[in-house]
Image (tube, rainbow, N blue to C red):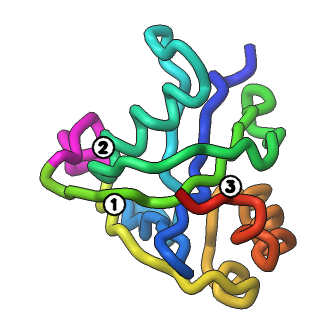
Amino acid sequence: MSPAPSVRAVLLDEDRLILFRRTVPGQPLYWSAPGGHVEPEDSSLEHTLHRELLEELGATVGAVTPLTTLTCPRPGGVKTQHVYGCRLVSMDPALRCGPEFDDPGRGLYEVVRLPLAAEEISAINLVPPELAAYLTGAVTRLHDLIPAG
């Protein structure tokens, strides 16, 4: 059985990409894009994205744009990740909630704003690697692919 599908946000704040710098006990440092698994109560992939952004960042975004669908081979099956582009409207860290923040064993989710440049993306351990490869190739087009407002 393949893992549940998930969504990821290519979330822009002006000329910066919002990511998590993940420090997890016993694991090497890595970065990830906001997002998460589709839950049974989610009415659509876009609903999942908005829910995850609110939970993980306390963020609201404008229109979302489908960018790509990644197939990520993993032990136990292929993980499908639907990647959407969006622009930050507001963010209130006081609204962050969910299991990520209830269990200290899950590590830290430090919000970082990375300059939107291929060399910046390739310099970090962004997971999944399929997303890193996509972003490195598409970084110069992201402003055109993700409409403002």
Local packing at callout 2 (Cα closer than 10 Å; few below 14, some 14-19, many 20+) is some
Residue at position x 56%, y 86% from top?
Answer: 115
Numbered tag placed on residue 70 in the rendering = none
Query: Position of 20 compared to 79: left or right?
Result: left
Q: Name the residue tied to disc 1.
A: 109
Instruction: Say whether residue 104 is magenta.
Output: yes
Asked if labels 2 and 3 touch by Cβ distance under 8 angstroms, the answer is no
Residue 57 position in % (x across, y down): 32, 53
Q: Residue pushed farthest left?
A: 94
Q: Earlier in the sequence, mark 3 or mark 1?
A: 1
Asked if labels 2 and 1 touch by Cβ distance under 8 angstroms, the answer is yes
Q: Which residues are magenta?
A: 95-106
Determine the CA span between mark 1 and mark 2. Answer: 8 Å
Q: Would you place residue 136 above or below residue 81 in this image?
A: below
Q: Which structural element holds mark 2?
A: helix
Q: Main secondary structure of the magenta part?
A: helix
Rendering quarter of residue 63:
top right
Q: Would you place residue 7 above or below residue 124 in this image?
A: above
Residue at position x 61%, y 58% from top?
Answer: 10
Residue at position x 73%, y 33% from top?
Answer: 79
Q: Earlier in the sequence, mark 3 or mark 2?
A: 2
Q: Name the residue tied to disc 3.
A: 128
Q: Name the residue tied to disc 2.
A: 100
Amino acid type indicated by mark 3:
Pro
Query: Position of 108 compared to 149: left or right?
Result: left
Determine the CA span between mark 3 and mark 1. Answer: 16 Å
Query: Position of 147 compared to 118: left or right?
Result: left
**Is residue 84 in view from this perspective?**
yes
Rendering quarter of residue 77:
top right
Residue 85 position in % (x across, y down): 64, 53
Q: Nearer the viewer, residue 19 or 10?
A: 10
